[in-house]
Image (tube, coloured by chain):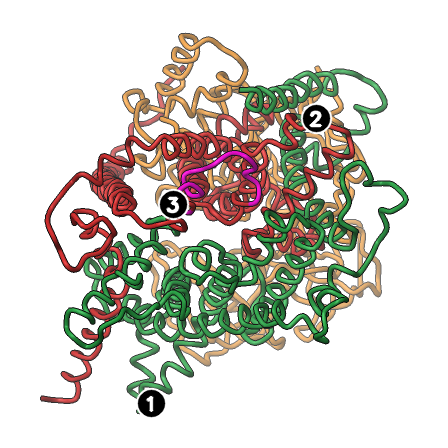
Chain colours: A orange, B red, C green
């Protein structure tokens, strides 16, 4: 069986500006695949290239093994859900859904039937004759999905479709999108800058920055084992510690900095003398009460604390400029710390990663 | 009396004076159309008559002029509206560097005296006719054809401005959405763009027709042997004055005012209906999000 | 009617050609069609739309705007020849049509063609004065409607302003003839009041014409200024007043700078229409030609010298272009803001 969507070393340039630089990956058929990155990272450009609105400067895109070069957006087996949905305001809900069939020359009766089925799928069975302006945000969302599904695409492309909704509806629509994808079983390519969306819905995620794909993997891999400093700092909270590698073995690397020696996993093959960043997640930090300095020992003083219900965040000042954040689950025991208290922290070396120095995501 | 009050009365007085200036001549004309004097005047009033109103209806030249004006108006709609639409659609597609030149060229007919447009059209088609050795009864020497071309030169620009105003509110992703769903470019044009522009097409057509119907300066040079309503009127007014012209003016003014009032009433009713629908929709939508049913199965 | 059949045949043929050609280009795998389809513009719009867009815009810009203007200019530098001699050895360029406007007939004694030059200068100067007058008259009204008047009253006033504009230009001029004619309203009233015995010939004294010209295009001054002032936040005016600014300074420093594009637009339109007016001078002017457009008209239809008429027309066009450029420079606005 041939694969779903192949991006074969594609680059997209607008004049001197390189929007996408040598993206190379394969999206399996039936996969829910997300491109995650800050705005301007090139993720929308890739999506528009797949749907046929942007031309490639280099490389090729294949869908089910067929090269898409020279095939216009109206001839590709893809359907795009736009960020603003781009529903047709002068048509009814049914006419919107059946538009793809109408332009394909499907007979009116068949169109009506198919639109009815899709309306049922999105649980708006009785709203077919309404105007678009009479729908709520969530309903519009569903109509846009139904309109795209009506043309029976092999790949559904979604360009941040939830960004206009309020938080609660957004979370609801995440589950809904995932359900629809599993029901229809086609490939979904999803664009977002919201890591929560990407992590909850996707089978695999590609993290992008400045036109370059930083890492491809499932949510857990991206979160637990980031390969670049950008991924480590963009996905989830992370505490970076800059330093120089002083010791390595087959699994770990030790960096030296103002806190002393810190040890973490060395998955990127760093060598002694390299500049590096050690990342440790707030939830992997723990308070240390022992007398003897532990391995991975950090001396700090408390700046502030935030109580968030199920978890508590402590902001602390270490020897560096940046505040260190520690999160712990609220187990009911009171935390008797006030501003200025000296606190010792420690962490398990298996939970920390040492990565080459690179771009960090803006906070 | 405070100075503020004096100010207020002065403003009112000025406005009254201004409107008197605007309407005075027209009202006098209206009165003169009912006066029995053989020359049009509102003073002295010698008696009341409606006989002047029957005269224009029997004036064959006038009727023929109206017919010619109608044909020209229709021709201008057929030419200027599509051109204006194309020019407006091109506006965003012209390369950046060319944009200001393009705009200057396409709005220049609006800022040019009508006589110049008439003259250049006349001279150009005449020489073209000489050049290809056309007969004198070919279209190069036809008044209706030349007038349609000459008037459309600047009326197209009016239409373009109407379309540009409407296009500013157009969401271009709709075109992309339609293409993405498999529509051809032609289908996008007819099924997405044209329905969106329909109100603008209607107002551009009305504007084109009225402007054409009113036009004198350009028409005078391009009309050749034909006569439009305005040139017939101008001829009559220049030669002599006659209360039947006042009567005709009263009829034209009455028609336009009735048309305007009807349009205004219609517009307000539409607005009211639209407002009510929008209000209801807002309520329904707010409820709908709360109890949206879960998605069903195929 | 043969002219209609010929027009419709031409249009019909053009449409037919487009319909036949479009699918041919679309389907054929020839080099030409591949080349055409390679152009980004065609890719974005498709063959049919590209043909329509380019065709219509080229027809307009080239055949209707640029070529006729160039032809008129070219024509103005030629001798007045019968059609049979056009393109012949006598058809050479000459400056004599322009020389005529300046110096008149060579056989004349006078150094300059005072008659025509005077009319030209009068046309331009009077147009400028009328433009200024229209601005002075309209600005307070526009300001009142845009900033002071309340909703429904303002709407009513606006409709009232538009109504006279719907009346044909010819008929508006005619209404002035009723007022100013020798047996017109003003004369009748003055005589019956015993102020004078014989009617004043307002038409011969040009009073009627200037009054008519001031009246004819006044609305084109109000609306652009009204639109511009309407977008001004009234709080700005109040803030200025609050700061103790006198009323004239508020207008000079706050309102007028904001309304600049509207004022520029109104002035340009009124000047252009007044200088290019033909109906009003014909109807309200005296027996001799008073307005430059009338001389142009005479060259075309009574003098029978189109080349000279074209030269005069080009001079008028030049004056209008200079005026527009001057307005753009004085008000520091671009053409896009003027033509709205």
- Label 1 SS: loop
Mark 1 surroundings: few (<14), some (14-19) or many (≥20) residues within 10 A: some
The location of residue A274, given as percent across then percent down, is: 82, 63
- Residue range highlighted in magenta: B221-234
Identify the image quadrant of residue B280. top left
Mark 3 surroundings: few (<14), some (14-19) or many (≥20) residues within 10 A: some
The location of residue A76, given as percent across then percent down, is: 64, 23
As for residue B226 lying within the magenta part, the answer is: yes
Q: In 3D space, how far apart are the residues under numbered discs 1 and 2 (Cα atoms)? A: 71 Å
Query: To which chain does the residue with label 1 belong?
Result: C
Residue at the disc numbered 1: C245
Q: Residue at x 19, y 50 (%)?
A: B37
- Label 2 SS: loop
Tag of residue B135: 2
In depth, the one of C187 and A99 nearer the eye is: C187
Query: Is B287 placed left or right of A8 in the picture?
Result: left
Q: In 3D space, how far apart are the residues under numbered discs 2 and 3 (Cα atoms)? A: 32 Å
In depth, the one of C72 and A269 nearer the eye is: C72
Query: To which chain does the residue with label 3 belong?
Result: B
Query: Is A71 placed left or right of B75 in the picture?
Result: right
Residue at the disc numbered 3: B236
Q: Nearer the viewer, mark 2 or mark 3?
A: 3
């Amino acid at each position: 069986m041939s694969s779903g969507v192949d991006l074969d070393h594609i680059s997209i340039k607008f004049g001197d500006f390189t929007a996408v630089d040598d993206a190379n990956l394969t999206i399996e058929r039936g996969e829910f695949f997300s491109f995650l990155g800050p705005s301007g990272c090139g993720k929308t450009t890739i999506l528009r290239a797949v749907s046929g609105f942007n031309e490639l400067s280099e490389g090729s895109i294949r869908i089910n093994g067929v090269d898409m070069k020279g095939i216009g957006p109206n001839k590709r087996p893809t359907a795009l859900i736009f960020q603003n949905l781009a529903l047709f305001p002068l048509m009814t809900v049914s006419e919107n859904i059946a538009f793809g069939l109408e332009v394909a020359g499907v007979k009116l009766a068949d169109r009506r039937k198919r639109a009815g089925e899709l309306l049922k799928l999105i649980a708006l069975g009785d709203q077919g004759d309404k105007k678009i302006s009479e729908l709520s945000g969530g309903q519009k969302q569903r109509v846009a999905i139904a309109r795209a599904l009506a043309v029976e695409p092999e790949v559904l492309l979604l360009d941040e479709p939830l960004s206009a909704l309020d938080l609660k509806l957004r979370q609801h629509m995440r589950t809904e999108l995932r359900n629809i994808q599993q029901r229809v079983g086609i490939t979904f390519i999803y664009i977002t800058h919201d890591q929560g969306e990407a992590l909850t819905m996707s089978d695999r995620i590609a993290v992008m920055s400045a036109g370059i794909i930083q890492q491809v993997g499932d949510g857990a891999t991206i979160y637990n084992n980031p390969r670049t400093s950008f991924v480590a700092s963009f996905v989830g909270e992370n505490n970076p510690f800059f330093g120089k590698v002083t010791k390595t073995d087959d699994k770990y690397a030790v960096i030296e900095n103002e806190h002393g020696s810190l040890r973490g996993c060395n998955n990127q093959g760093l060598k002694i003398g390299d500049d590096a960043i050690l990342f440790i997640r707030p939830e992997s930090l723990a308070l240390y009460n022992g007398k003897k300095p532990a391995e991975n020992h950090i001396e700090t003083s408390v700046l502030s604390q935030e109580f968030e219900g199920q978890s508590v965040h402590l902001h602390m000042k270490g020897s560096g400029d940046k505040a260190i954040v520690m999160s712990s689950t609220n187990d009911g025991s009171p935390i008797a710390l006030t501003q200025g208290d000296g606190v010792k922290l420690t962490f398990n070396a298996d939970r920390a990663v040492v990565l080459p120095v690179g771009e960090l995501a803006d906070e | 009396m405070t100075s503020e009050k004096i100010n207020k009365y002065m403003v009112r007085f000025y406005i009254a004076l201004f409107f008197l200036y605007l309407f005075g001549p027209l009202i006098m004309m209206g009165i003169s159309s009912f006066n029995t004097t053989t020359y049009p005047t509102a003073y002295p009033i010698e008696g009341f008559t409606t006989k002047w109103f029957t005269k224009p209806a029997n004036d064959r030249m006038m009727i023929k002029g109206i017919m010619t004006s109608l044909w020209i108006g229709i021709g201008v709609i057929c030419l200027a509206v599509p051109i204006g639409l194309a020019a407006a659609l091109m506006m965003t597609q012209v390369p950046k560097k060319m944009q200001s030149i393009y705009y200057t060229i396409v709005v220049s007919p609006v800022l040019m005296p009508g006589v110049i447009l008439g003259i250049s059209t006349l001279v150009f088609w005449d020489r073209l006719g000489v050049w290809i050795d056309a007969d004198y009864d070919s279209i190069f020497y036809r008044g209706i054809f030349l007038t349609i071309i000459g008037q459309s030169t600047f009326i197209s620009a009016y239409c373009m401005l109407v379309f540009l105003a409407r296009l500013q509110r157009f969401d271009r992703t709709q075109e992309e959405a339609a293409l993405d769903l498999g529509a051809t470019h032609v289908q996008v044009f007819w099924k997405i763009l044209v329905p969106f522009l329909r109100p603008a097409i209607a107002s551009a057509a009305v504007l084109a027709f009225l402007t054409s119907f009113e036009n004198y300066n350009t028409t005078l040079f391009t009309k050749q042997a034909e006569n439009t309503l305005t040139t017939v009127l101008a001829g009559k007014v220049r030669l002599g004055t006659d209360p039947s012209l006042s009567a005709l003016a009263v009829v034209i003014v009455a028609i336009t005012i009735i048309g305007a009032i009807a349009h205004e009433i219609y517009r307000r009713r539409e607005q009211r209906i639209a407002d009510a629908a929008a209000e209801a929709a807002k309520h329904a939508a707010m409820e709908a999000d709360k109890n949206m049913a879960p998605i069903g199965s195929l | 009617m043969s002219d209609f059949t010929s027009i419709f045949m031409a249009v019909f043929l053009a449409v037919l050609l487009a319909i036949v050609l479009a699918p041919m280009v679309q389907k054929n795998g020839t080099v030409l069609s591949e080349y055409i389809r390679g152009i980004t513009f065609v890719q974005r719009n498709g063959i049919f739309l590209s043909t329509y867009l380019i065709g219509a815009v080229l027809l307009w810009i080239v055949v209707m705007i640029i070529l006729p203007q160039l032809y008129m200019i070219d024509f103005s530098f030629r001798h007045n020849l019968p059609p049979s001699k056009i393109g012949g050895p006598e058809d050479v360029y000459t400056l004599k049509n322009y020389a005529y406007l300046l110096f008149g007939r060579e056989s004349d004694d006078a150094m300059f063609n005072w008659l025509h030059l005077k009319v030209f200068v009068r046309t331009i100067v009077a147009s400028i004065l009328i433009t200024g007058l229209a601005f002075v008259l309209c600005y307070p009204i526009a300001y009142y409607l845009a900033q002071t008047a309340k909703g429904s009253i303002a709407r009513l006033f606006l409709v009232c302003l538009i109504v006279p504009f719907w009346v044909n230009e010819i008929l508006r001029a005619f209404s002035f003839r009723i007022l100013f004619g020798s047996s017109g309203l003003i004369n009748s009233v003055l005589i019956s009041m015993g102020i004078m015995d014989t009617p004043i010939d307002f038409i011969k004294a040009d009073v009627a014409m200037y009054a008519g010209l001031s009246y004819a295009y006044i609305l084109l001054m109000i609306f652009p200024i009204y639109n511009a002032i309407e977008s001004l936040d009234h709080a700005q005016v109040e803030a200025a007043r609050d700061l103790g600014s006198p009323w004239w300074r508020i207008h000079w420093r706050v309102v007028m700078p904001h309304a600049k594009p509207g004022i520029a637009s109104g002035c340009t339109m009124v000047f252009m229409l007044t200088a290019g007016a033909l109906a009003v001078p014909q109807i309200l002017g005296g027996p001799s030609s008073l307005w430059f457009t009338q001389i142009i008209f005479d060259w075309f239809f009574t003098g029978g010298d189109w080349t000279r008429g074209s030269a005069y027309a080009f001079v008028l066009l030049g004056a209008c272009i200079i005026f527009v450029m001057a307005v753009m420079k004085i008000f520091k606005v671009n053409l896009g803001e003027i033509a709205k």
